Amino acid sequence: MAAPRPGSQRRIDVLAKLRSEVDLWVASADAEGGAYLVPLSFYWDDSALTIATPRASRTAVNLIRAGWARVALGPTRDVVIIEGPVEAIPIGTDAALEDAHARAVGFDPRELTDEYVYLRITPHEIQAWREANELAGRQMMHRGEWLA
Amino acid sequence: MAAPRPGSQRRIDVLAKLRSEVDLWVASADAEGGAYLVPLSFYWDDSALTIATPRASRTAVNLIRAGWARVALGPTRDVVIIEGPVEAIPIGTDAALEDAHARAVGFDPRELTDEYVYLRITPHEIQAWREANELAGRQMMHRGEWLA
């Protein structure tokens, strides 16, 4: 097992992962406490993650209801977990964002039959760790502020 | 993008992944609809997945409350998503299971200070897909029965 990374290196690695990865895992729940989990593609604009999913999907309904998301970038031994508020942006609201999202994820929700919605998640809490020896110090951001 | 796999091949691949992988993503939710997501290691005994986590952790509390889990094996472009009922097994109940779990995951909850609980998840629903062209036919198991 490699030595634990200092916080400064983990922050660099978190940002590199946000810029290079295409997919993440999105957890959500309904009002009755039923959990849901799917992989989705995302666009990172250096301040928030934008995903798009059908407005009628469980993920969209759950996240808009909760107003808060918990998402994870993998793999499981190089984890970044992000929580933050969710802003729902209807199709046709922000052409620049929609263009950038389509380039990043490889599909364009505006061209699809289903009505999609963009969900913009702004990181307020970030954790990052690889192996068990990095669980200490895994909190990288708290209430929107970087800790390292 | 590769051609979509037939269901028979996907079933072989699902079982191979359950036998070879060590970690999965566990989604859960509290009674108020707050979603949670963590990676955990698991042991597959050819009929169920067993994870272990502190009894006081959000994942254990949420899954025992719900009695149902949704977990995912990755990566995001080779997904297996499993849902099923959760059985909570206290430490010291089933030595054979505890030994096998410790061998599979590389740590032994019986040696830790925190009180752990084993959570045994029996697959009732399984989905498997790689790229978008495999979304059709992704349902591999329904109500505990293989479809392919």
Image (spheres, coloured by chain):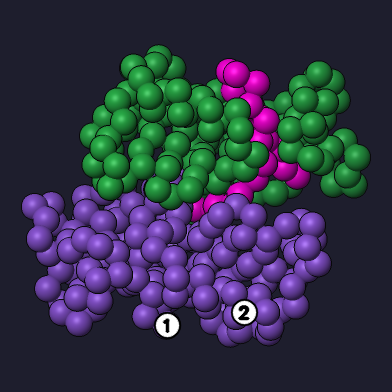
Chain colours: A purple, B green
Tell me the residue at 29%/42% (across/down). B2
Q: Amino acid at mark 1?
A: Ser
- Of residues A122 and B128, the one nearer the viewer is B128
Residue, far front: B2
- Measure how far apart labels 1 and 2 are at the Cα level: 14 Å
Q: Which residue is mark 2?
A: A11
The image position of residue A1, as x and y in percent, is: 79, 57
Dividing the picture into quadrants, the one containing residue B122 is top right
Predominant SS along the magenta part: strand
Q: Quadrant of the C terminus of chain B?
A: top left
Q: Is residue B101 magenta?
A: no
Horizontal side of residue A52 vs A3, given as left or right? left
Q: Of discs 1 and 2, which sits in the foreground?
A: 2
Q: Which residues are magenta?
A: B35-54
* Residue B120 image point, x, y percent: 64, 27
Residue that carries the numbered disc 1 in the rendered image: A47
Q: Nearer the viewer, residue A55 or B138?
A: B138
